[in-house]
Image: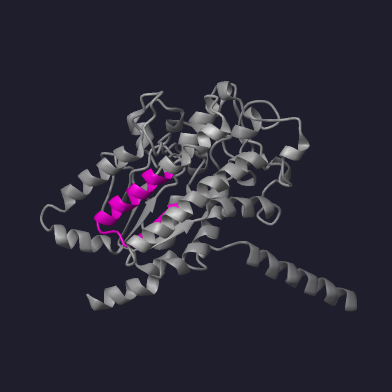
């Protein structure tokens, strides 16, 4: 009997521990904020279909992308993204891509585009940049605000704006073209300034609740682990991630957080929240067992080809020789660059718990009562 009791208490303790570790999207539901709409700027981490409107024959427009959703939607994953889970938590339909002519934009718009950069690329003629998305946003609001600009801007006070994640591609393209780490670090102030300017732009459209995500720890991604591998074991941390690349992500994130501090000082009546993608991702890695992820494949792409990380640029996901793992829900990385639906879901849950109190939703309720 004593043994049975101990077993029962052990199971109960495990259950309590398990459910404390798993962040529920409903634990601090964004629906209590009563947002009227959500607007998203960013890159492939958030793109719900703009890129495939620009490039219809992209690999993102066909399987195996979207296989968990049973259709390719333009999302760079097997399924949903962080923005999808944020929208669901807020009680808002999944955001349609701005370039989708058949999209419904009554409750928000997604302007994010895969491969987008914060800055123009002088070495490559690149049109997928943050300023272009801001141009789309301007066109959109100019169109819907024709009758009553003041009322339109007032409505945006009850919307949620996400500026990013953006900037990761600026660094990705530079590093993969052979730029030194010091050269790439020199880009950080300009990238962060572009993000800061974008935040100011959305404030100009009436935004009062803004989320600004930081960058993931890129040293944990197959994309980098395969291309920047070294023989020195001391170059890797306890999670087998490249330390110097993660330190670079921290460098960017520190500059971004300082910019947010400055923005808060300039706009004291606007709530600007830093979304800590870096810590959310490391939490995901550290709790892999509890989350049902395969701890032996944390840095191995589900969809790809060859090598220790199942990643090869020349035969990436969507290539005829690329293979897809049998259960994407047990993996973190989808294609070596982007994450699986399961990973995004867990990260979104962590983020919602973290940002909910910082959004000060009770102030939105007070505004609702006032009007």
Q: Nearer the viewer, residue 137 or 104?
A: 137
Q: Judge by depth and name the residue closer to the eye, 84 or 130.
A: 130
How are the colours assigned in the image?
Answer: one colour
Q: Position of residue 321 (x, y in %)?
A: 59, 21
Q: Residue at 33%, 61% (x, y): give it.
A: 266
From the viewer's perspective, tell me whether residue 106 is left or right of residue 1.
left
Does the magenta segment cover residue 214? yes
Q: Where's residue 245, x and y in %?
A: 61, 39
Question: Magenta region: which residues?
Answer: 192-216
Q: Left or right: 343 with respect to 135?
A: right
The residue located at (79%, 73%) in the rendering is 8
- Asked whether, in this view, residue 366 is left or right of residue 226, the answer is left
Q: Is residue 98 left or right of residue 179?
A: left
Location of the N terminus (image quadrant): bottom right
| Residue at 59%, 54% in the rendered image | 279
**Vertical placement of residue 305 versus 8, above or below:** above
Q: Residue furthest right?
A: 2
Q: Which of 85/112 is in front?
A: 112
Q: Residue furthest left?
A: 147
State whether residue 87 appears in this view.
no
202 drawn magenta? yes
Residue 2 can be seen in this image: yes
Please report the residue visible at 45 percent of the width from the left and 32 percent of the height from the top. Answer: 60
Where, by quadrant of the figure, is residue 340 drawn? Answer: top right
Q: Position of residue 121 (x, y in %)?
A: 39, 29
Nearer to me, 27 or 104: 27
Point out residue 244 in the picture as x, y percentages from the top left corner: 64, 40
* Total marks placed: 0
Quarter that holds the C terminus: bottom left
């Amino acid at each position: 009997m004593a043994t049975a009791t101990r077993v029962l208490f052990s199971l109960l303790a495990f259950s309590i521990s398990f459910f404390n570790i798993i962040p529920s999207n409903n634990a601090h539901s964004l629906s209590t904020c009563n947002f009227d709409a959500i607007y998203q700027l960013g890159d492939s981490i958030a793109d719900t279909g703009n890129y495939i409107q620009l490039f219809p024959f992209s690999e993102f427009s066909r399987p195996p992308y979207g296989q968990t959703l049973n259709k390719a939607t333009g999302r760079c994953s097997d399924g949903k993204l962080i923005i999808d889970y944020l929208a669901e938590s807020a009680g808002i339909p999944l955001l349609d891509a701005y370039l989708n002519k058949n999209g419904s934009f009554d409750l928000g718009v997604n302007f994010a585009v895969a491969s987008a950069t914060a800055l123009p690329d002088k070495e490559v003629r690149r049109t997928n940049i943050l300023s272009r998305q801001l141009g789309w946003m301007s066109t959109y609001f100019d169109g819907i605000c024709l009758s009553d600009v003041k009322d339109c801007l007032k409505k945006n006070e009850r919307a949620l704006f996400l500026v990013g994640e953006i900037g990761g591609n600026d660094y990705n393209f530079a590093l993969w073209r052979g730029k030194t780490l010091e050269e790439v670090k020199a880009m950080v102030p300009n990238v962060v300034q572009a993000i800061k300017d974008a935040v100011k732009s959305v404030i100009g459209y009436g935004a009062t609740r803004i989320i600004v995500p930081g960058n993931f720890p890129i040293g944990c991604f197959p994309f980098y682990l395969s291309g920047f591998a070294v023989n020195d074991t001391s170059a890797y941390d306890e999670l087998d991630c490249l330390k110097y690349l993660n330190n670079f992500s921290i460098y960017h994130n520190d500059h971004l957080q300082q910019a947010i501090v400055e923005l808060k000082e300039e706009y004291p009546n606007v709530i600007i929240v830093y979304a800590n993608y870096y810590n959310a991702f490391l939490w995901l890695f550290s709790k892999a067992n509890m989350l049902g992820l395969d701890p032996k494949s944390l840095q191995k792409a589900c969809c790809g080809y060859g090598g220790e990380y199942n990643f090869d640029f020349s035969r990436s996901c969507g290539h005829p020789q690329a293979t897809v793992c049998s259960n994407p829900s047990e993996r973190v990385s989808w294609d070596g660059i982007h994450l699986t639906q399961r990973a995004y879901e867990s990260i979104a849950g962590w983020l919602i718990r973290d940002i909910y109190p910082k959004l000060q939703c009770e102030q939105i309720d007070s505004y609702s009562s006032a009007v």
